[in-house]
Image: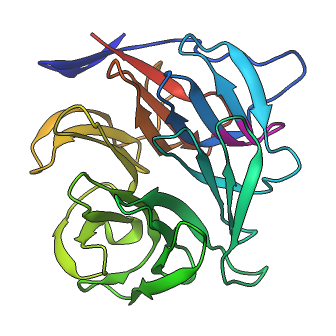
């Protein structure tokens, strides 16, 4: 079954993702690919961080004694993996060999839902979206020292209802998925508002393809969108009612990434199972 249109058509890879016997997926809330096109799945299941090859074969798992409440993931150019935890209010960093090397504690109480995602600027600063309760973006040094934060509750520029994800483009513009306001806000690295995209289906996560001008978007209301940086939609599928049909979404698209071939991986919440893979035709 294929989705999309024109130059951006994709075939749904039915049955992608094979777990060792006796393990279950849980919610596959976030997904990322490294330079070797290995697929890292951050999940609320038996293993919190699982690694697969592009064919869906299980390679190994990390972080069983570290990650308690998976939410967001980022992989930098050196293969370091960063995982944000919502309910335990932290960010955990692993090096490319899977060694646990750094932790940032994020302010919050056990009753609050907190950090959602992370991205890194060209200068190495870390930007963490913090998210459900605090509605701010936090900026840290590479060593984990907080530099600044911005945001407050509301609907105006620089205000948020739910800071769900942060991504940084090649020009160091900071893109924030302000999910409950149904928009993406764009800032510079000092938190100065630049512009926004409106009327989206509650954007959860975006991913920039480093090889071209393409942006991939996972929207919680059951839609995946492929578009240019100036908001031209090139392909989209899903949206509307939840569906059990192959390649559509019974839960909500929550995490998204693309590999070097342009194949798309989408993690979901609301339904247990592997990420969905779409192979570019």
Which colour style is shown?
rainbow
Total of numbered circles in the picture?
Answer: 0
Depth check, front residue: 15 or 99: 99
Q: For the point 41% across and 42% down, which residue is it?
A: 222
Which one is nearer the viewer's eye here, 49 or 135? 49
Residue 44 falls within the magenta-colored stretch: yes
Res 203 visible:
yes
| Observer-nearest of 228 and 24 | 228
Drawn side of residue 254 relative to residue 174, left or right: right
Picture coordinates of residue 271 (x, y %)? Answer: 63, 39
Quarter of the image where the C terminus is located: top left
Residue 180 is covered by the magenta coloring? no
Q: Is residue 97 above or below residue 162?
A: above
Q: Quadrant of the N terminus?
A: top left
Q: Is residue 281 left or right of residue 56?
A: left
Residue 165: horizontal and vertical position, in percent?
A: 44, 60
Location of residue 196 (image quadrant): bottom left
x 85%, y 26%: residue: 23
Image quadrant assignment for residue 197: bottom left
Picture coordinates of residue 254 (x, y %)? 50, 47
Measuring from the top left, give residue 135's x and y in whole percent. Answer: 48, 81
Q: Residue at x 26, y 69 (%)?
A: 185
Tell me which segment is drawn in magenta: 42-49
From the viewer's perspective, is residue 268 above or below residue 106?
Answer: above
Q: Is residue 54 left or right of residue 185?
A: right
Above or below for 144 versus 207:
below
- For the question of whether residue 249 can be seen, the reply is no
Residue occupying the point 24% across, 73% down: 188
């Amino acid at each position: 079954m294929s989705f999309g249109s024109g130059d951006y058509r994709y075939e749904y890879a039915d049955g992608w993702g094979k777990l060792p016997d006796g393990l279950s997926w849980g919610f596959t809330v976030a997904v990322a690919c490294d330079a070797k096109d290995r697929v890292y799945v951050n999940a609320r299941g038996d293993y919190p961080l699982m690694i697969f090859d592009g064919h869906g074969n299980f390679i190994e798992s990390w972080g069983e004694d570290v990650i308690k409440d998976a939410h967001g993931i980022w992989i930098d150019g050196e293969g370091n993996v960063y995982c944000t935890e919502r309910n335990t209010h932290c960010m955990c960093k692993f090096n490319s060999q899977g060694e646990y090397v750094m932790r940032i504690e994020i302010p919050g109480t056990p009753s609050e839902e907190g950090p959602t995602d992370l991205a890194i600027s060209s200068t190495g600063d870390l930007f963490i979206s913090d998210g459900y309760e605090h509605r701010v973006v936090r900026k840290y040094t590479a060593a984990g020292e907080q530099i600044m934060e911005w945001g407050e509750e509301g609907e105006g520029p620089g205000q948020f209802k739910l800071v769900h994800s942060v991504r940084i483009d090649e020009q160091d513009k900071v893109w924030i998925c302000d999910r409950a306001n149904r928009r993406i806000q764009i800032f510079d690295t000092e938190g100065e508002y630049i512009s926004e995209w409106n009327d989206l289906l509650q954007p959860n996560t975006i991913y920039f393809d480093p090889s071209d001008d393409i942006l991939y978007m996972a929207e919680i209301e059951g839609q995946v969108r492929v578009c240019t940086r100036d908001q031209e939609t090139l392909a989209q599928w899903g949206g509307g009612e939840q569906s059990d049909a192959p390649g559509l979404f019974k839960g909500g698209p929550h995490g998204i990434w693309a590999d070097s071939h342009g194949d798309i991986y989408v993690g979901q919440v609301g339904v247990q199972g592997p990420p969905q893979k779409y192979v570019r035709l």
